[in-house]
Amino acid sequence: MSEIIILKNSCKGIEDCGICMSVCPKNLFAPSHEMNERGFLPPRVIDEDPCTVCMNCMVSCPDMAIVVAKKKKTKEPK
Amino acid sequence: MDAIEHPLRKYTRPHVTRTTTCPGCGNGIVAQAILRAIDELGLEMDDFVFVSGIGCSAWIPSPLFAADTLHTTHGRPVAFATGVKLGRPDMNVMVVSGDGDLTAIGGNHLIHAARKNIDLTVVLVNNGIYGMTGGQTAPTTPLGLTTITSPYGTMEHPLDISATIVAAGAPFVARWTTAHPRQLTRSIKKGLQKKGFAMIEAISQCPVQFGRVSKLGKATDFLQHYKKNSISFSKASGLSREELAGRIVIGEFVDIEKPELSSQWMDLKHQMGQEAQCHNKQ
C-alpha cells in the first residue's frame, strides 16, 4: 500500500513535462483539468492500489513535486 | 504552500519554492540526484561548497541548495573550486555546471584539474547545446544538427568530454543520462567518496532549445531516446566505431586510486612546519 502525493504548486505541468506519466510502469497518472496557481496542469493519480512503490515518478520528477510513501497500517492520532 | 514536504526539501533554501528550469528540463532530475546522494551518504550541507558557472545547469545549486554556493564567471567554476579546495581542504567542493561552461569556455580548467587530481566532484550536465542563450552550437552538439548559429547543419564533430577527462588522468569518470537517475545517484555518491578528481557527466534533455532544433520532441521523447540508444561501457568496448554511431555510451569509465593534490599540499605544509621548528631549536 502506498500513498502518492502530488505537490501541485511545484509541478510544471503534464503538457510540456509529463515525465511521471511516462515512467510509471502501471500508468497510474492521468491528466487533470485543474490548474495550479502558476497555470500548469498537474497530473492526478487514478488509483493508488496497483502502485508497487518503485518510486520512478519520485526520482524522475524534475521539480520535486511527487512524494511516494509507504502507507503505515495504523495512523497516528493527530 | 503544500502541507506535505518532499523529503529532499530540507536541503533546499526555504525561500526558493520552485526550480528555475523550463518544464521537462533534465536539470531538476540531476539536482534531485545530487541531493539524494548527499542524503544517502548522510553528509551535512554545511560541509559543502557548490561552485557553478554560467548557464541553465549552473542554476541548480545557486538558488536552490541550502549550502554555500559560488556563482562564478563563465567557464571558471573549476578554477574557483580549486582555490576553495586548497584553502579549505576539509570542505566537500562540488562543481555543477553545463557543457557550454565546462567543455567549451572552461575546457582547459577542467582538463588540468583532472590532471592535477584535486579532490573535486564535478557534475557536468550535458544537453548538447547552449540552452540559456538561445540554442547556439556547443562543442557537444551532434554533427549535422541545425542550430541558430549553424543554419545549414553543424560541420564540427562533437567532443567526447568523458573520454577527454579519462585521458587527462582523472581517477573517477562516469556518464549517465537523465533516464538513469538511480545510476546517476550511485555514481555521484562514489564521486563524493572518491579522494581525488571525480567527474560525472549527465546527458540531459533540453526540450525547449535542443528539442526544437533536433525535432526530438517532448521531454518524455528524450527519455525514451536515451533509454533506447544508450549502451553500457562494457558492451560498447567490443563494438566498432560505425556500430557506435549515434549511441550514448554510459557507465563508469574509470575508478582508480591516485595521490591527491590538496592532501599532498597539507602534508608538505606539515613537513615544512616541522622543519622550521627544528631549525628554530638549533
Image (cartoon, coloured by chain):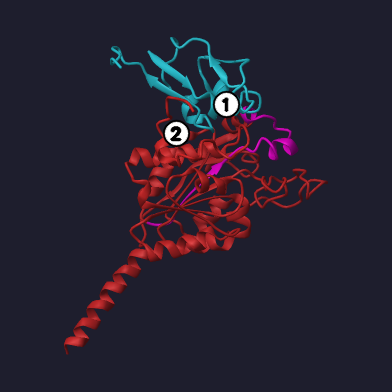
Displayed quadrant of residue A13: top right
Residue density around tag 2, few if under 14, some if 14–19, many if 20 or more, within 10 Å? some
Residue A28: x percent and y percent? Answer: 52, 14
Residue B220 is one of the magenta-drawn residues: yes
Judged from this view, the residue extending furthest toward the left is B281
Subunit under mark 2: B
In the image shown, does B128 or B167 lie closer to the viewer?
Answer: B128
Residue B67: x percent and y percent? Answer: 42, 49
- Residue at 45% from the left image edge and 36% from the top image edge: B183
Residue B69: x percent and y percent? Answer: 47, 53
The answer to whether mark 1 and mark 2 are in CB contact below 8 A is: no
Residue density around tag 1, few if under 14, some if 14–19, many if 20 or more, within 10 Å? many
Say if residue B117 shows up in the picture: no
Residue B153: x percent and y percent? Answer: 79, 46
Total number of numbered discs in the rendering: 2
Query: If the image is split into quadrants, where does the C terminus of chain B sit?
Result: bottom left
Q: Amino acid at mark 1?
A: Ile
The relative height of residue A60 versus residue B38 in the rendered view (above or below) is above
- Residue position for label 2: B182
Q: Amino acid at mark 2?
A: Arg
Residue B166's mark?
A: none
Subunit under mark 1: A
> Disc 1 to disc 2, how far (Cα)?
15 Å
- Residue position for label 1: A19
Report the span colored magenta. Answer: B196-221
The relative height of residue B94 versus residue B186 in the rendered view (above or below) is below
Q: Colour of chain A?
A: cyan
Residue A2 is one of the magenta-drawn residues: no
Q: Colour of chain B?
A: red
